[in-house]
Image: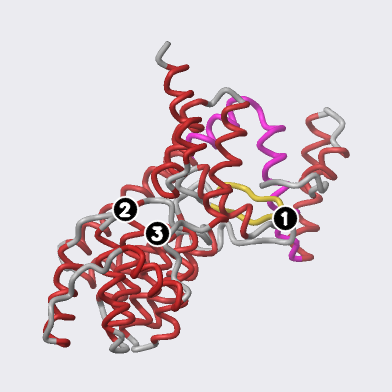
Amino acid sequence: MTTNKRTKMDELADELTGNVAQDRAFLDAEALRAAETGEIASRRAVGRLRLTTASKRTARSWRRNFQALSERFDALLEEARQAAAGRRLDDALEMLATLESRVAGLFDEDEETRYFYFANPLEEAICDRVYPSEKTWRRAPIDYPLFYFTIGAVQLEARRPREAKAALNKALAFNPVDAETLCKIADVARRERDFVGYLNATTQALRFSYRRRDLARCYRNLGSFYLDVQRYDVATAAFHFSLTFEESQDARRELKLVESKTRRPAKAPPFEKLRKIFDAEGIPTRPSVETVEAARDLAIRAQNAGDFALASRCFDVIWRLADDAEAKAALDALNARTSE
């Protein structure tokens, strides 16, 4: 997701001479100038160049220290998640607030760079297709989406929807195509009886879903929306369609609720009838074209680069979710090739 545009680091690197003392003095002066002018991109470029010009011992020490910080962050985040799972919400929020004081703002977007953290290359490919950027994209060294998602989920459990939404939006800043975060934003909207916000967040999540569990969650959300607005035929279709992707007791309970409201069985409609119901509401029955084509492009690039494992995963996504015969044939060919 990088561009060919020259960055501050490129410009500064051109000024380096190879003389250690001279280069360090130059970088010190640039760091001071950047601090005085508030140029975040320049300060970060100086930091990266200082690492490249440092002695091997110093560079190893810096990397070890940062690795230790990252591991400590992961451990503390897991501790907070365990506290939340045990319903110790105040303890969890206190731990998360302490962590946030250490990491907030470290990798915010600057004049030329945006930081991201995707779960896998497919999410990056989807984001690149949907949200192309002229800025350079760099991977953040810590999992900000999970961190802020955790804060949002705990705040929602603590009945603080405003704080929950603010945290979840921060998670999206580092991964704009995370369906799970968008579904949690939908949960916040539903708690506030914001039906429009609930529908919008669910629709966005559905747009980026490539895992069966995410698709199931989105269709359950749609079922809940139409249940709330008393459109029981659409709700029934959505809950049943969600079950084609993942079995869920939540969907089964909601169907029982539909039956109690309508006083008749909430049977699954034939697919053609379901499709007509969905078409009338603008609800897709397949993954978005953007997601499928992002997966296809990535699969082809991975195959050409010899990364057959990644190519297979992408073709598998396309075949299983879009029932794509071409992707199935490509997957079979890859499997045959790797098994030889």
Side of 306 relative to 314 (left or right): right
Whether residue 51 appears in magenta in the rendering, the answer is yes
Q: Position of residue 218 (x, y in %)?
A: 36, 66
Amino acid type, residue under disc 2 in the picture: Leu
In the picture of the structure, the residue carrying the numbered disc 2 is 76
Q: Nearer the viewer, mark 2 or mark 1?
A: 1
Residue 213 quadrant: bottom left
- Return the residue nearer the eye: 118 or 315: 315
Residue at point 20% right, 61% down? 83
Of helix, strand and loop, which mostly describes the magenta segment? helix
Q: Quadrant of residue 252?
A: bottom left
In the structure shown, which secondary structural element does the residue marked by tag 1 occupy? loop
Q: Is residue 197 above or below residue 16?
A: below
The magenta span reads 38-65
Q: Which class describes the residues within 10 Å of circle 1: few (<14), some (14-19), or many (20+)? A: some
Marks 1, 3: nearer the viewer:
1
Spatial CA distance of label 3 from label 2 is 10 Å
Q: Residue at x 44, y 82 (%)?
A: 197
Q: Which mark is residue 200?
A: none
Whether 88 is among the magenta residues is no
Question: Which mark sits nearer the N-terminus, 2 or 1?
Answer: 2
Above or below: residue 293 compared with residue 158: above
- Which residue carries the number 3 mark? 147
Give the alpha-carbon distance from disc 2 to disc 1, as whole Å. 32 Å
Quarter that holds the C terminus: top left
Labels 3 and 2: the sequence-earlier one: 2
| Residue furthest top as drawn | 340
User: Dot 2, how many residues are within 10 Å of its Cα: few (below 14), some (14-19), or many (20+)?
Assistant: some
Q: How is the image coloured?
A: secondary structure
